[in-house]
Amino acid sequence: MKTKSLLANLALCCTLAVATPLFAKPMSTNVPIGHSVKVGQTDLKAGNYRFLIDGDHLTVFVGKNNVAEAQGKWEDRDTKSPYTEVISTADGKLLELRFEGKKSVFVLNQ
């Protein structure tokens, strides 16, 4: 009887561990951009934008208008970011979004 109970609890824990990311809430944050960047196929000028990350999908808004979209993934870093920022290449292609106090960064697909 104990073995069945142990196996049932183990199966439940595994199921919850797999299902938890499916129920993760989308992350939304406002980020000022001081220089032009390219997100996906869209060029964004310097200004204030709202970034919405839902799973592996990034949507960029100005007010209520969707202005850019891109795919990416979450990656962990060794240290927490001291502030929220965008990281881009010398030619302005957006590489990743870092969030204040978080070790996880959102890296855009190349």
Image (cartoon, rainbow, N blue to C red):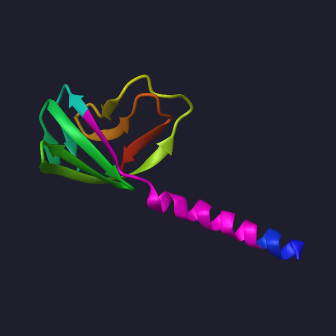
Predominant SS along the magenta part: helix
Residue 67 lies, in percent from the top left, at: 13, 48
Residue 31 counted in the magenta span: no
Q: Residue at x 46, y 62 (%)?
A: 22
Of 14 and 68, which appears nearest the observer? 14
Residue 13 counted in the magenta span: yes
Residue 96 lies, in percent from the top left, at: 36, 39
Q: Residue at x 53, y 59 (%)?
A: 20
Of 97 and 65, which appears nearest the observer? 65
Of 68 and 31, which appears nearest the observer? 31
Visible residue check, residue 110: no
In the picture, the quarter occupied by the N terminus is: bottom right
Residue 69 lies, in percent from the top left, at: 22, 53
Q: Residue at x 25, y 35 (%)?
A: 30
Residue 9 lies left or right of residue 34; in this view the side is: right
Tell me which segment is drawn in magenta: 8-30
Q: Is residue 81 above or below residue 64?
A: above
